[in-house]
């Protein structure tokens, strides 16, 4: 059953990716164009640093799959793409491995194909400390993701129905493992309250993983007879909404969910993310164009994100959070309801640009 479910997840996720790719709330975020803020390409360093972690580029391949023969092959190819482009990568949930150790190779193939890369193991919030350590050991993982998926579990026919112990378990795992712990949603977003709670639990970072990408409520509903939960399609908060809602929190934030192109990645960094993850879009590229196609796509994203940083005058990913941004549409209404200071976002570059231009001009 577990292997079939993993294969179903991949099939249904790709079907979603091949469906509508219209407007999402990243389109409600725009940079205020400044014709004189550009810098030289040689000044730009795309490296990002957070929670004792350094990545050469603020892009990563986010959690997807594992647990069956077919998904093991996908993980192998994803790991090759990660190796060739130098991006970090996460496995999918390793719950299948805890139930059946014969599936170990569908996850450990990532380390075999990418021996020197940054790899994140992935467990759910019900995992024991011992299971979390086993996951890290199997992959010789550099970090551990704990995924939060209460809506997915609710819709999943065989899903969990008890959630009250999740916070305590996350705190135990974060204190017990020897690698940084990153808590992540699976596509429904993290509110400010959730981010602050995770901060108190001692996790190293939070991946907001918002709506707009793969919808796991829809996937699990498609696995049901009768689609009883179709009214939950689209449930949650977008990644831009999560980042804006969590302005001023102390925990590093990663952004994923609905990231379609390098501009969405730049928007995420401008809203405070330290790095940006992609799952479904890269999976579709892999299945449609093979490993070579995925390598080419990731490489193009890396090059184009640096080009955008150069045009926007950002020497580092963190400096994108100094650029002025305007918030429109439904996202603006969300911000007004949640008390986000939109005027500050629209004019925050003034002091930085004045000082920067004085250093350059005689």
Image: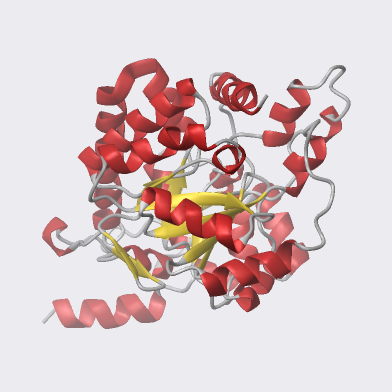
Residue 112, percent from left and from top = 28, 39
Q: Give the answer, above or below, for where 345 lies relative to 190.
A: below
Q: Nearer the viewer, residue 149 or 177?
A: 177
In the image, residue 12 lies at what x, y percent?
62, 21
Q: Is residue 246 visible?
A: no
Q: In which image quadrant can residue 313 be found?
A: bottom left
Task: Residue at 50%, 59% (x, y): give it.
Answer: 133
On the question of residue 321 being in view, the answer is: yes
Coordinates of residue 358 in the picture (x, y in percent): 21, 82
Q: Is residue 219 above or below residue 328?
A: above
Q: Position of residue 223 (x, y in %)?
A: 74, 21
At a point 34% along the width and 60% down the height, the residue shown is: 34
The answer to whether 322 appears left or right of 12 in the picture is: left
The residue shown at (24%, 49%) is 307
- From the viewer's perspective, tell me whether residue 94 is left or right of residue 287: right
Work out which quarter of the rendered image holds the N terminus and state it: top right
Q: Total marks drawn?
A: 0
Q: Can you say which quadrant of the picture contains the C terminus? A: bottom left
- Judged left or right of residue 254, residue 150 is right
Determine whether, in the image, residue 230 is placed left or right of residue 199: right
Quadrant housing residue 246: bottom right
**In which quadrant of the rendered view does residue 287 lie?**
top left
């Amino acid at each position: 059953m577990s292997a079939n479910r993993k294969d179903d997840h991949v099939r249904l996720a790709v079907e979603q990716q091949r469906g509508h790719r219209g407007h999402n709330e990243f389109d409600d975020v725009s940079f205020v164009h400044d014709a004189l803020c550009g810098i030289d390409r040689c000044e730009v360093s795309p490296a990002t640093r957070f929670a004792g972690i350094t990545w050469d580029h603020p892009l990563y391949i986010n959690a997807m799959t594992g647990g069956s023969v077919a998904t093991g092959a996908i993980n192998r190819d994803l790991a090759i793409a990660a190796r060739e482009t130098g991006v970090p990568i996460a496995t999918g949930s390793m719950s299948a491995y805890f139930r059946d150790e014969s599936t170990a190779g569908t996850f450990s193939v990532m380390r075999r194909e990418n021996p020197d890369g940054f790899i994140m193991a992935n467990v759910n919030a019900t995992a024991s400390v011992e299971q979390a350590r086993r996951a890290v050991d199997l992959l010789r993982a550099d970090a551990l993701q704990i995924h939060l998926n209460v809506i997915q579990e609710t819709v999943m026919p065989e899903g969990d129905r008890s959630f009250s112990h999740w916070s305590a378990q996350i705190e135990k795992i974060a204190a017990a493992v020897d690698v940084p712990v990153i808590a992540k949603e699976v596509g429904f977003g993290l509110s400010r309250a959730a981010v602050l709670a995770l901060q108190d639990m001692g996790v190293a970072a939070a991946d907001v993983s918002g709506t707009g990408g793969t919808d796991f409520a829809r996937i699990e509903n498609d696995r049901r007879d009768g689609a009883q939960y179709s009214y939950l399609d689209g449930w949650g908060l977008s990644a831009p909404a999560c980042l804006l809602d969590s302005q001023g929190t102390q925990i590093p934030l990663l952004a994923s969910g609905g990231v379609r192109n390098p501009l969405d990645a730049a928007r995420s960094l401008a809203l405070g993310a330290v790095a940006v993850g992609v799952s479904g879009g890269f999976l579709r590229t892999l299945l449609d164009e093979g490993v070579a196609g995925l390598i080419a796509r990731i490489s193009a994203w890396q090059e184009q994100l640096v080009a955008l940083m150069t045009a926007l005058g950002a020497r580092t990913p963190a400096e994108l959070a100094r650029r002025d941004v305007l918030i429109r549409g439904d996202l603006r209404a969300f911000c007004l309801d949640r008390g986000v200071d939109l005027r500050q976002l629209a004019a925050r570059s003034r002091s930085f640009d004045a000082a920067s231009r004085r250093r350059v001009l005689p």
